[in-house]
Image (spheres, rainbow, N blue to C red):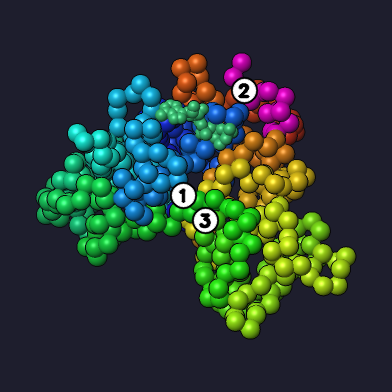
Amino acid sequence: MALIEGFRVQNYRSLRDITLGKLSGQQAGDPLTPLTVVIGKNGVGKSTLFDAFGFVSDCLNSDVEAACDMKQRGGLERMLSRESSGSIRFEIYYREAQGERPITYELSIGQDSSGRPYVESEMLKQRRKGQKHGRPFPFLRLDHGKGTVWAGEEAVEIAGEEDKTQEAVELTDLRQLGIATLGTLKEHPRIKRFRDFLKGWYLSYFHPDAARSLPSAGPQKHLNIHGDNIGNVVQFLEREHSDRFRLILNRIASKIPGVKKIDTKVTDDKRVLLRFNDGAFDDPFFAQQMSDGTLKVFAYLLMMEDPDPPPFICIEEPENGLYHKLLESLAREFRSHATGKKGAPQLFVTTHQPYFVDALTPQEVWVLEKGKDGYSSLRRAADIELVQNMVNQGLPLGGLWYSDYLDAR
Ligand SMILES: Nc1ncnc2c1ncn2[C@@H]1O[C@H](COP(=O)(O)OP(=O)(O)OP(=O)(O)O)[C@@H](O)[C@H]1O
Ligand SMILES: [Mg+2]
């Protein structure tokens, strides 16, 4: 499975320069874990970090200008860190699978003379086969839409032969990412794989009301960002995985307090209705009558049961609307799916909730703080010696956070 080992954000709102995990040029840090959780007080930049992933994904799926205007981002001017003159920059350090050589993607988004955002530069690079140390070699390098790309799977693998596979490229649209265009071409399989990985990212903006809508029939493979196609996803599972379908619903039902059984009913006009039986009444309730928290847990658990899950899933504050005792088990549930094994998703979660954090290790948890200068800084809980020692002695991490051991003193 693909794993993001590190992510650096520069000049994105309060994130003037923060790094999560390990990068090509910062090898000292440990890589991100398959489950990564960011905690912190109000206003420290959790949503901003969540949205930094969302922004990169939106840049690929539409274009950088549209992405700046989406999701209340309010345009590039507002997104650039205050009092900072640089461009917005991202660096993603990732492996396509365990044992593969890491790949670095660098993206820089600037403002042209008329104030419009454009793709200033982009780079994809990787070390040569067998090369353990030293400089990685680019296989895509673009600056203001112009640059060089090295075609083929084996491009730049052999020292001295780079020129043979090198091609000059010039893009016509500076609002589109180069990987969006070049990643559709057969001669660039490595760019295509990276583009496909980024395309597969899933950011959950789950909305219980949306999930109550009655979707028209038609199976759909994955839950969409607002979760209003839960019924369609259930239908997909029923059709494609009929053998496992009952088992999955039973398993989910056993994990939601107060729910005894979940099943589906198809209406005459072929819509799929989800039915929840709480054991107290003979007749089941439909999704429209279920509580926000129940629907939310159902959506998360369904997402975790996806036989072909997205490679990277971001969830913001899963605790909202959930009973506190459910949170520790939800965190364990997330962990049991983000195993780091082939086909398993990587999960990135932001939270306020100590109960959720109780189930986590200090390696998995990052603390965001805001300095006096108004910018965010980030620390891994495992790097706070006292915290690591107390966890080693059996104290739960969320409790330590609650008692202020994770805050800067
Ligand atoms: N362009 C900018 N430059 C610097 N800081 C900014 C910029 N735009 C917004 N901010 C600041 O970024 C901070 C981070 O907000 P964010 O919504 O990410 O916090 P949060 O950790 O999600 O908080 P909450 O827990 O309340 O949801 C805000 O306090 C805001 O003042
Ligand atoms: Mg927030």
- Above or below 15: residue 339: below
The amino acid sitting under disc 2 is Asp
Q: Measured from the top left, where is residue 383 in percent x and y?
A: 56, 27
Q: Is residue 333 visible?
A: yes
Q: Nearer the viewer, residue 49 or 336?
A: 49
The answer to whether marks 3 and 1 mark residues whose Cβ atoms lie closer than 8 Å is no
Q: Measured from the top left, where is residue 214 in percent x and y?
A: 61, 68
Q: Which residue is mark 3?
A: 225
Q: Which residue is mark 2?
A: 407
The amino acid sitting under disc 1 is Leu
Q: In the rendered structure, find residue 27 and report the number of the disc placed on it.
A: none
Write the start and end of the magenta stretch as one range: 397-409
Disc on the earlier residue, 1 or 2: 1
Mark 1 or 2: in front is: 2
Where the C terminus falls, by quadrant? Answer: top right
Give the residue at x 25% y 35%.
115
Mark 3 crowdedness (10 Å alpha carbons): few <14, some 14-19, many ≥20? some
Mark 2 or 3: in front is: 3
Q: Which residue is mark 1?
A: 3
In the figure, residue 105 lies in which quadrant? top left
Q: Give the CA separation, mark 2 to mark 3.
A: 32 Å
Q: State whether label 3 is within 8 Å of ligand 2.
A: no
